[in-house]
Image (cartoon, helix red, strand yellow):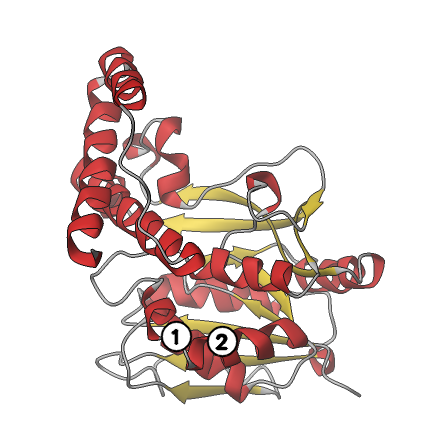
Amino acid sequence: MTIAISVVIPAHNPRVDYLVAALGALKAQTLALNRWELVIIDNASSPPLAGRIDIDWHPLARIVTEAKLGLTHARLQGLEQSVGSIVVFVDDDNVLAPDYLSTVLTIADLHPFIGVWGGVIAPRFEDPALAPPKSASALLTLRSAAHDSWSNDPNHHASTPWGAGLCLRRSVSARYRDELSSDARRQALDVQGNRLLYGGDTDMAFTACRMGMGKGVFPALKVEHLIPAARCSLDYLCRVAAGRGYSEVLHTLILTGAIPETPTVGTRIRRIYTMLRASAFDRRLMHAHDEGRRQATKDLL
């Protein structure tokens, strides 16, 4: 039987109990094992992942190494090593709902014009008492959606999927790989070890748009994001906010060829007013985000 889906898990020094939970959720999928393959990309983990996790339950599972550190490099290796007509990227701390893969195929059949899509992402906190305010949800890659949303407008944020459980058609992945091979800057649009940069997911979605296809978010696709206590600290969230600010500038430069314009006086005044009304927690995050943008402008000019 033809492999319909390739599940690709990039992993760099993963928390093993989280990765085991992610694999357990895949083992429980309702889609028959002969319809999908499992490719784990060991991205310069120390010690290596081989022999530390059980994948013998899947007849089409394997571990592939990628020595060049970075989520984008691991994903590209996953695209190279997989064969399914649809690729589903699963992070090493993602727990998919049991019907996730079967629902991916249903959406693909019902919406052939959509090239990249994802779903809703709920938290599973290691220590719920440490859960940060909901204003930090996006920084923890959490997402809710009340209804299906799709578009081929890059500026339509509600239809732009995020990385956990991200799905893309093979035609989009081929175009994405080709474009990245000639643009090294785009290879920096994601986490690289402890360097918290972002944007690879959005880059894939925008690739679909450039191909005349769409991007979408579907609440029927459900993921739990396992969140350790350390990622709930304000210091960590500020690092994420700064990385997102930096990535926004880099992404704009890649898309338009120019650094974003300096905010007008009116825009700066409104920003200051928003900060004054925000909680101390949110002000720290806003300052970190703005500092990330300033640093990117300084580095990239």
Q: Secondary structure at mark 2?
A: helix
Q: Callout 1, which amino acid?
A: Asp
Kindly check if marks 1 and 2 are in contact, taking CB atoms under 8 A apart as contact: yes
Residue drawn at x 80%, y 88% is 1
The residue that appears at 26% across and 25% down in the rendered structure is 282
- Reading the image, the residue beneath label 1 is 183
| Callout 1 secondary element | loop
| Residue 150 appears anywhere in the view | yes
Q: Position of residue 243 (x, y in %)?
A: 26, 50
Front residue of 130 and 163 = 163
Q: Is residue 112 left or right of residue 254?
A: right
Q: Nearer the viewer, residue 101 or 184?
A: 184
Side of 192 where 65 appears, left or right: right
- Is 67 on the left-hand or right-hand side of 57? left
Is residue 233 visible to us here?
A: no
The residue wearing badge 2 is: 179
| Picture disc at residue 146 | none
Q: Position of residue 269 (x, y in %)?
A: 26, 16
Please name whichever residue, 265 or 44, is drawn nearer the observer in this view of the structure: 265
Q: Is residue 133 above or below residue 32?
A: above
Please name the residue shown 45% across and 50% down the image. 225
Disc 1 and disc 2: Cα gap in Å? 7 Å
Q: Is residue 88 above or below residue 219?
A: below
Q: In the picture, residue 57 is in which quadrant?
A: bottom right
Above or below residue 31? Residue 254 is above
Number of other residues with Cα within 10 Å of mark 2, as a class: few under 14, some 14 to 19, many 20 or more: few
Q: Indicate the amino acid at tag 2.
A: Glu
